[in-house]
Amino acid sequence: MPIEKNDSQLLSELAPVVDENLTRHLAEADGWQPHDLVPWDQGKNFAFMGGTDWSADQSTLSDVEALALTVGVLVADNVPAYHREIAKHLAQVGPWWRWVGRWTAEENRHSIVLRNYLMVTRAVDPVALERARMDEMVRGYAMPPMHLIEMLANSAFEEKAAAVRHHNTAALGEDPLVAVIAERLAADDELQSLFYRNIVEAAFELVPDQTMRAIASRIAAFDVPSVALPGGTDSTAVLAEAGIYDPAQQGEKVFAPLLRSWNIADRTDLGSEGEKARDELSALL
């Protein structure tokens, strides 16, 4: 009979793997500094401090680059809501809690570098951006109900999707510094996805059917976090149109690399329920 474990049991039994992967993550992570990537010599005061307020002709970024960075900063600015939702699923002690803190700090670093870059270079309207930030944080984020393995798989997919978005922003190649910033963010997101990927792999060793079901259910319901942009448009459609992140390519760009790493197609440790979930997953993709 297939083994099943509740979230409390899994939190306890997976804790050593979390500790091991947090240690690895800290050893591999680039300790880059946000202030190094901001061209401070381009900065000047706004009218409140005796300078000149923003106007559209001051921006040197393309509309696509400005859009990509705006979405990036609005998503990262909402990290308190994401922190709360992740923390609800993970033990608030030990390696799980240390991971939540580390992940939150890394995401906040993304917000810092993006906002400072946008303000110093006057790449976007600062008033519109601040109003959008206020609206987005008031709107907040609520994760749909999930069990632990579902949350871990979903987080692996979300971080992989964020890395794809940042890689595509860098690939525009229009501004060399934007490309450097975007690749730094993508590297963080790839490592974060790897952390979650490895914990899901460990869950397969404990409860293969339960893990396969969790992966299938999250792929079936997966949506990247979206934000309301200045002007009222939704980021998902706009990013897809701009070629920065297209949900139609999620199967290839986001899901497939992780499914290969979990050896989904060739696993031989599944019971009938796991096989059923794998069949459903094949149909989805």
Image (cartoon, rainbow, N blue to C red):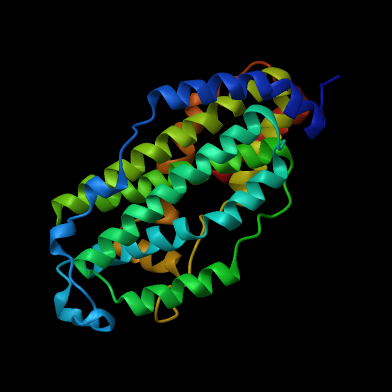
User: 144 and 27: which one is in front?
Assistant: 27
User: Which of the 4 image quarters holds residue 2?
Assistant: top right
Left or right of residue 88, residue 255 in this image = left
Residue at 41 percent of width and 74 percent of height: 130
> Residue at the front extreme?
49
143 or 283: which is nearer to us? 143
Q: Where, quadrant-wise, is the N terminus in this rendering?
A: top right
Residue 230 position in % (x across, y down) = 40, 77
Give x and y (percent) for residue 256.
46, 36
Visible in this render: residue 171? Answer: no
Residue at (29, 50) in percent of width and height: 168
Left or right of residue 215, residue 170 in this image: left
Is residue 182 at all visible to an observer of this figure? yes
Quarter of image, res 62: bottom left
* Nearest the eye: 186 or 87: 87
For residue 178, above or below residue 201: below
Q: Up-down: is 79 above or below 98?
A: below
Q: Horizontal and vertical percent for residue 26?
A: 45, 26
Q: Residue at x 46, y 26 (%)?
A: 25
